Image (cartoon, rainbow, N blue to C red):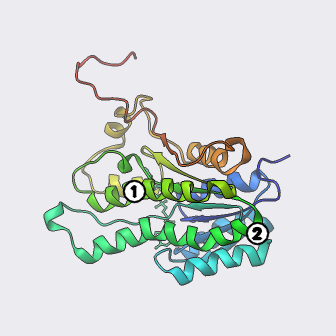
Amino acid sequence: MGRLDDKVAMVTGGSGGIGSATLKRFVAEGAKVVCADIDEERGEKVAGELGDDAVFVRCDVSSLDDVTAAVDAAVQHFGSIDVLFNNAAWSSGGYVADLDPEAWDRSLRIMLTGPMYGMKAAIPYMLEQGGGSIVNTSSVYGLVASPGVAPYCSAKAGLINLTKTTAVEYGRRNIRVNAICPGVVETPMFEAVLGTGLTTREKVAEMHALGRTIQPEEIANLVLFLASNESSAITGQAVVIDGGLLSDCNLTGLPPVA
Ligand SMILES: NC(=O)c1ccc[n+]([C@@H]2O[C@H](COP(=O)([O-])OP(=O)(O)OC[C@H]3O[C@@H](n4cnc5c(N)ncnc54)[C@H](O)[C@@H]3O)[C@@H](O)[C@H]2O)c1
């Protein structure tokens, strides 16, 4: 018995680190999956490795037409859409006074409007089917801030309240909506941050109470729980999965127990 037997799930950003790990976990638990991403080459590879239980659909989440077509494809191919994991991301950056308005708009379209499009497209099917589970990838940056990442922080914070609003709208129709707020996860996105040379893996790892960064498979475990019936009483939440990053505000200077 798999925890997602007879369920169909769509994952945006499915070609990436967290998305592909989650797709693998979902299939191992009995789901049929749609890998939706703008990156065709990696997406086809991810879906191909999962066999007949997976299809890739090229989808730019900033386009309502693309997102609607991807959700429709899930239903046409596998018969329903039970789980939607809105997980794609792209962001511009810079200090607020220097932000490029077009890049700001694109960041919000991908990370905030995109999940809204996904829910707009999937909810009518979920209402017809009698329920569903939606998980939106926010971030610790939906809750706290760092210099230079205003578009990312703003979109991820907005996504938490979009999650809560949708949860209170559709809870009585058995549609649950939750957000996850990861700390630093070992994916191409983190590699890109390291590529700027402004920080190091060791420095970042030290900021987490666990003394290490997070693996994509550890995020996939949480998404699986929220997607499955095991979390049947959980909705409207922003679940932090950060290795203790946000708990550590060391003002005493005392080192943690080694
Ligand atoms: N890696 C981290 O440390 C971290 C921490 C907190 C939150 N997150 C969030 O986790 C999610 C997954 O990120 P990841 O770490 O796996 O990074 P990743 O770069 O491996 O994956 C992101 C994916 O999104 C896709 N994408 C970008 N623009 C798109 C678009 N317009 N339409 C469709 N797909 C698009 C990319 O092609 C890529 O496959 C993101 O929402 C990210 O903000 C990541």
* Residue designated by label 1: 156
Residue 191 lies, in percent from the top left, at 40, 54
Which mark identifies residue 8?
Answer: none
Q: Vertical placement of 66 versus 195: above or below?
A: below
Are circles 1 and 2 on residues that touch, CB within 8 Å? no
Left or right placement of residue 248 versus residue 115 in this view: left
Tally the marks. Answer: 2
* Residue 53 sits in quarter: bottom right
Residue drawn where x is 49% and y is 57% of the image: 165
Q: Is residue 72 above or below residue 251?
A: below
Whichever of callouts 1 and 2 sits on the residue coming sooner in the sequence is: 2
Q: Badge 1: how crowded within 10 Å, few (<14), some, or many (20+)?
A: many
Which quarter of the rendering shows the C terminus? top left
* Residue 252 in the image: above or below residue 128: above
Q: Is mark 2 within 8 Å of ligand 1?
A: no
Question: Residue reaching furthest left?
Answer: 97
Three-letter code for the amino acid on which mark 1 is drawn = Lys
Which residue occupies 36% across, 49% down? Answer: 141
Q: Amino acid at mark 2?
A: Ser
Judge left or right: residue 37 versus residue 247. right
Q: Is mark 1 within 8 Å of ligand 1?
A: yes
The kind of secondary structure element at disc 1 is: helix
Question: Can you tell which quarter of the image residue 208 is in?
Answer: top left
Q: Position of residue 91 (x, y in %)?
A: 35, 65
Q: Residue furthest right?
A: 1
Q: CA distance from mark 1 to mark 2?
A: 28 Å
**What residue is shown with label 2?**
80
**Which element is circle 2 on?**
loop
Residue at x 27% of width, y 25% of height:
250
Residue 15: horizontal and vertical position, in percent? Answer: 57, 65
